[in-house]
Image (cartoon, rainbow, N blue to C red):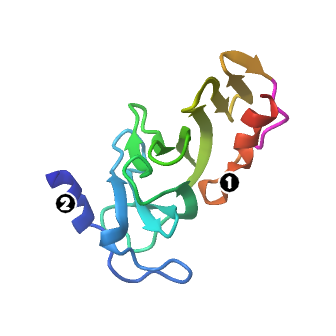
Amino acid sequence: MKSIVFFLALLPSTGFPDPVAPIDLKNVISAVGPSWNTAGNYKAVLVREGEYAALYIFRGPFDEEPLVYAPYAAITGPYWGMVPWLEFDEGGTLILHSENRAFGRHKWESTLSINERNGAFFVSAYSLSSYDSLDPYSFLDCNIDILAQKAVLNTIDITPYPLPTDVLIEDWSEVLGAVCYAAD
């Protein structure tokens, strides 16, 4: 907990150019960093902005302007089980988790893997798992490796239409998730 408080103390409090507003610390959902496994030593912050969570990525301990501002990085909600979070894996890949385990009969969980390349942050993989809590035979387990152009749907390899290989996190949309539903 002390590391989170220390990290939040390093966040900038002023100086964002339009359209990026200053981060209101009471809206911070998750924060990680710095990632010592990458050359960039960046940190990431997920901030609730309405029904979405915006992703900010900073480099260095005192950056005032984010390298990345992705306003629609994840869906968020008011209940526990609807709150996204961030973490780094062993290789320094930033993982963005989001889920709905709290509301309605359709439960889902997704992850985005975000990698840095030449100073830009790209989505390298996407996974989606979902199920209907009233129908045990209605489920979906889909993994898309954007870099390898491969997808697996419910343990079966599928051949997706050509996926874009350079999906910036700022440009992320659930359109890639349509690969999972189109093959279903």
> Which segment is the magenta one?
159-164
- The residue under label 1 is which amino acid type? Ser
Secondary-structure class at tag 2: helix
Q: Looking at the picture, does residue 176 appear above or below residue 44?
A: above
Q: Quadrant location of residue 172?
A: bottom right
Residue 114 relative to residue 78: left or right:
right
Of the two numbered discs 1 and 2 in the rendering, the one whose residue sits closer to the viewer: 1
Q: Which residue is mark 1?
A: 173
Give coordinates of residue 36: x percent, y percent.
Answer: 33, 43
Residue 133 relative to residue 81: left or right:
right
* Quarter the C terminus occupies: top right
Mark 2 crowdedness (10 Å alpha carbons): few <14, some 14-19, many ≥20: few
Q: Looking at the picture, does residue 140 appear above or below residue 3?
A: above
Main SS of residues in magenta: loop
Residue at (38% x, 43% y) in the render: 87
In the orientation shown, which residue stands out farthest toward the left?
A: 2
- The residue under label 2 is which amino acid type? Phe
Residue at (35% x, 64% y) in the render: 28
Give coordinates of residue 167: x percent, y percent.
Answer: 68, 49
Give coordinates of residue 108: x percent, y percent.
Answer: 55, 39
Q: Is residue 165 visible?
A: no
Residue at (55% x, 83% y) in the render: 18
Q: Which residue is mark 2?
A: 6
> Of the residues under marks 1 and 2, which one precedes in the sequence?
2
In-front residue for pair 80/60: 80
Residue at (85% x, 34% y) in the render: 161
Secondary-structure class at tag 1: loop
Marks 1/2 in contact by CB < 8 Å: the verdict is: no
Q: Is residue 129 visible?
A: yes
